[in-house]
Image: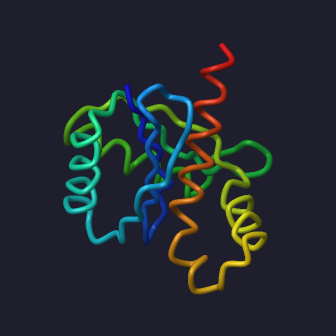
Amino acid sequence: MRILGLDIGSRTVGIAISDPLGWTAQGITTIKRKNYTQDIEEIKKIYDEYDVSIIVAGMPKNMNGTIGPSGEMVKEFCEKLKESFDPKIEFWDERLTTVAAHKAMLEADLSRAKRKKIVDKIAATYILQGYLDRISNK
């Protein structure tokens, strides 16, 4: 049982996958968004390749817990995924995951150019790992 983590942005989608036991998350790629059809095709390929059972999508919330325009965009994207191939999707509060990803990369002394290329993949890893940690504690 593998779980797919998505950090959905307006220009890119960061993607992470769990190990088969559902203990750890690894960032695998970042998709440059083109249009819904191509974006969903790429995600579907990864979904099938890893035999995914659940998609965990990061839900960007405002600091007061409300959902703003970015959250609405994520909901709309996930609706398109469901229309296309009907995966099980759960949302995970992604507040501060991008901040944490940037901090980790700064601590690793990565250049700005390298950070820009992988920040969404790292954020997807944080989203998925948070979800995995929660389900393992149940």
Residue in view at x 22 percent, y 40 percent: 48
Check the picture and name the quadrant holding the N terminus.
Answer: top left
Residue in view at x 58 percent, y 59 percent: 122
**Total marks placed:** 0
Residue in view at x 41 percent, y 65 percent: 30
Taking depth in this image into account, of 45 and 63 the one nearest to the observer is: 45
**Direction from residue 94 to residue 69 in the image, left or right:** left
Residue 94, compared with residue 121, is above or below; it is above
Residue 5, compared with residue 131, is above or below; it is below
**Direction from residue 13 to residue 69 in the image, left or right:** right
The percent coordinates of residue 115 (x first, y second) are 61, 76
Residue 28, compared with residue 137, is above or below; it is below
**Scheme of image coloration:** rainbow
User: Quadrant location of residue 38?
Assistant: bottom left
The percent coordinates of residue 66 (x first, y second) are 69, 44
Taking depth in this image into account, of 69 and 102 the one nearest to the observer is: 102
Check the picture and name the quadrant holding the C terminus.
Answer: top right
The percent coordinates of residue 120 (x first, y second) are 53, 63
The percent coordinates of residue 40 (x first, y second) are 25, 53
**Direction from residue 96 to residue 59 in the image, left or right:** left
Residue ranking furthest to the top: 138
Taking depth in this image into account, of 33 and 54 the one nearest to the observer is: 54
Residue in view at x 43 percent, y 61 percent: 13
